Image (spheres, helix red, strand yellow):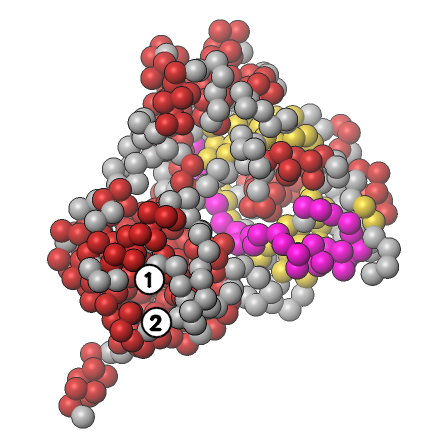
Amino acid sequence: MDELTKLSNASLDAMPVGVRVPAYDRSELTPGIVHIGLGNFHRAHQAWYLHRLMDAGEAHDWAIIGAGVRAGDAAQRDRLLAQDCLTTLIELRPDSISAEVCGSMIDFLPVESDNAALVAQMADPSTRIVALTVTEGGYYTDPVTGGFAEDHKDIQADAANPDAPATAFGAMIKALRIRRDAGTGAFTGLSCDNLQGNGAILRQTVVGLARMSDPDLADWIDTHCTFPNSMVDCIVPATGPAELDLVRSLGIDDDAPVTHENFRQWVIEDDFCAGRPDWDKVGATFTNDVHSFEAMKIRMLNGGHQILANAGEVLGIETISDAMANPAIAALFLKVQGEEIAPHVDAVPGTTPHDYLSLIMSRFANPAIVDTTRRVAFDGASRHPGFLLPTIRAGLKTGDPVNGLALVEALWARMCQGTREDGSQIEANDPIWAELQSAAQNARQNPTAWLDQSSIYGDLKHAPAFASAFSHWLATLWEKGVEATISDYTQSEEDLRQTASR
């Protein structure tokens, strides 16, 4: 397209035909939510629900103020402020696309080392919810015990300097101290990350950090703030050159577009101390049983993502849909899900584990979603303990099989060795990549060296049903390769008997 319309408030009326734009007057919006972590997922998910509620004439006093606590967030701030905090959301169906402009965010705070602007906005009485998408590994929890990692250097620094906090949680605590002292009341802390019991984990981090410097404040926060659990779901790829080309092919000049699948789900515990938008009017679900929804989604969808991504990376398969199209990987996915994950997942209202498996298979197979195996495999040191190891522990406890999950862990170790089967290099893809790569290289000769990473696996190396299977599969991966090893696992017992008798 020769002429592009630069995305801004002034150009909304000039957007290309077919692009949905806000039906509300953005100049009349006032803030109610601070959201920390303005990545693609938040803008395609939580911001969209609020945007659609605003379109319905409601929640105009709940607009989002964006924030970040990392130096890299400053570049995102610049991009979004340059287009009045508007985002083009492009929905990718298997056979078509559609676009709308989301306008529920109205500002992005300066990114500062002491988080002064963030603290001031959270301390303002207009802020009634502080929401976060800071990744699964961003909550300072011990990956084995699940407890608060108070010895982490970031936590120690904030505890020693509560008036100049560097973390989001330290900033929340300082703002809450100001609110308590001013008598303006508490706010709700709303985690939107893929963690089972994410609200309880957020409470643990905030209260735990506060207790290290101000026990009375910690007690006040624990009593007066609420931290609802929630389950979030929407596949949202990273934005790169292809996504920028796509939005421009629609006639829109947007430096921060977001592509996403044609599916969203948001299940929230209704526990908000200072009020909330009526997100349920636009498709969210409020319930007192978030746990069952979380378990199904985290174990089957997020765990399933790791099954696909690690195998795909070693084979040089670039996208999740292409991994799903690989017969060997698809067979691994289906067998592990059906035999080792789904038996430990309860049904939720309207959906059984079997139905949910069919749903996520169709979503993962959507070729319009260019979601890379590299993105999904990122930070496995947080994702495997969160998404897969709980199911392994559940299987060991009940005596159910964990053979396939042991193979999935072996595939992760094989990936972290750092080379694909074609000899190409896998670039660093984890905050502790050097440690993982060292363990993976040692494990090539001694598979249990991988399980010696107690900060990830805890005592699982002492569980024979898992550890022996892991060692077998990792040795087989190096001997036979990924597809042949998967074939060994996916063959039925009858197939194996027939093979042995020939």
Amino acid type of the residue tagged 1 in the rendering: Arg
Q: CA distance from mark 2 to mark 1?
A: 9 Å
Residue 225 at x, y = what percent? 43, 21
Q: Badge 2, how many Cα within 10 Å: few under 14, some, many 20+?
A: many
Of mark 2 and mark 1, the one earlier in the sequence is 1
Task: Name the residue carrying label 1.
Answer: 414
Residue 260, compared with residue 329, is above or below; it is: above
Residue 229 lies within the magenta run: yes
Residue 477 at x, y = what percent? 29, 69
Q: Badge 1, how many Cα within 10 Å: few under 14, some, many 20+?
A: many
Residue drawn 59% across the image and 30% down it? 67
Horizontal side of 302 relative to 7 (left or right) equals left
Label 2 element class = helix
Quadrant of residue 312 within the rendered picture: bottom left
Amino acid type of the residue tagged 2 in the rendering: Val
Residue 88 seen in the figure: yes
Label 1 element class = helix
Residue 52 lies within the magenta run: no
Residue drawn 34% across the image and 29% down it? 152
Q: For the magenta stretch, what is the residue range?
A: 228-256
Residue 114 at x, y = what percent? 53, 20
Q: Please state, as top left, top right, bottom left or bottom right, where the N terminus lies in the image.
A: bottom right
Residue 127 at x, y = what percent? 58, 22
Residue drawn 74% across the image and 47% down it? 254
Could you tell me if the residues under marks 2 and 1 are in contact, i.e. CB atoms within 8 Å? yes
In-front residue for pair 493/346: 493
Residue 62 seen in the figure: no
Residue 482 numbered tag: 2
Residue drawn 47% across the image and 60% down it? 373
Residue 501, compared with residue 35, is above or below; it is: below
